[in-house]
Image (tube, rainbow, N blue to C red):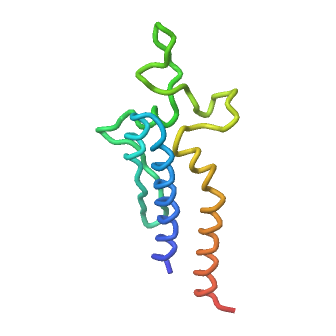
Amino acid sequence: MRDEVKQANFDVADKLTDAAKAKASGLSRQQRSAAQSLRATKTQNYAAIRMGSARKPYALGAEFGAKKRTRTGTVARGFSPWRGNQFDGWAGGPGYFLHPSIRERGPQLIQEYTDKIDRLMSEAFPE
């Protein structure tokens, strides 16, 4: 049963990375490239989503944007405007592709996950 729970955790993370990559496909080249670095990982105890790499150190900037501005007033290094945790004025929340995917797909993925865990528990502990 432990392996099935571990796989259920990984499946949620994997589906979320797929959704974020799909969302990024309609964004800038930098954001599409950064989204390709998203990967679901698993350990014995949890699953996670990792982003960025040595070849894509800009991944978090692509997800959250930048606050710093150049002399001309444009956002630095081609990043989109800041959508991080301290942004006030944009009602949709932080992020451009991963976090919006969490907000959009989260309820459905939580339901799928709890259904899977309920099924596994009822198999392990029948009435």
**Depicted 89 relative to depicted 4: above or below:** above
**Depicted 118 relative to depicted 35: above or below:** below
Residue drawn at 49 percent across, 15 percent down: 74
Q: Position of residue 57 (x, y in %)?
A: 36, 35
Q: Position of residue 29 (x, y in %)?
A: 39, 35
Q: Residue furthest top?
A: 71
Q: Residue furthest bottom?
A: 127
Give the position of the C terminus as an image quadrant: bottom right
* Drawn side of residue 91 relative to residue 30, left or right: right
* Drawn side of residue 126 relative to residue 72, left or right: right
Residue drawn at 66 percent across, 59 percent down: 107
Q: Nearer the viewer, residue 120 or 100?
A: 100
Residue drawn at 64 percent across, 77 percent down: 118
**Depicted 117 relative to depicted 30: above or below:** below
Q: Residue furthest left?
A: 55
Q: Which quadrant of the figure has residue 86?
A: top right
Residue drawn at 48 percent across, 41 percent down: 26
Q: Nearer the viewer, residue 102 or 47?
A: 102
Q: Nearer the viewer, residue 76 or 48?
A: 76
Q: Position of residue 110 (x, y in %)?
A: 63, 63
**Depicted 106 relative to depicted 28: above or below:** below
Q: Position of residue 62 (x, y in %)?
A: 45, 34
* Drawn side of residue 107 relative to residue 10, left or right: right
Number of numbered discs overlaid on the protein picture: 0
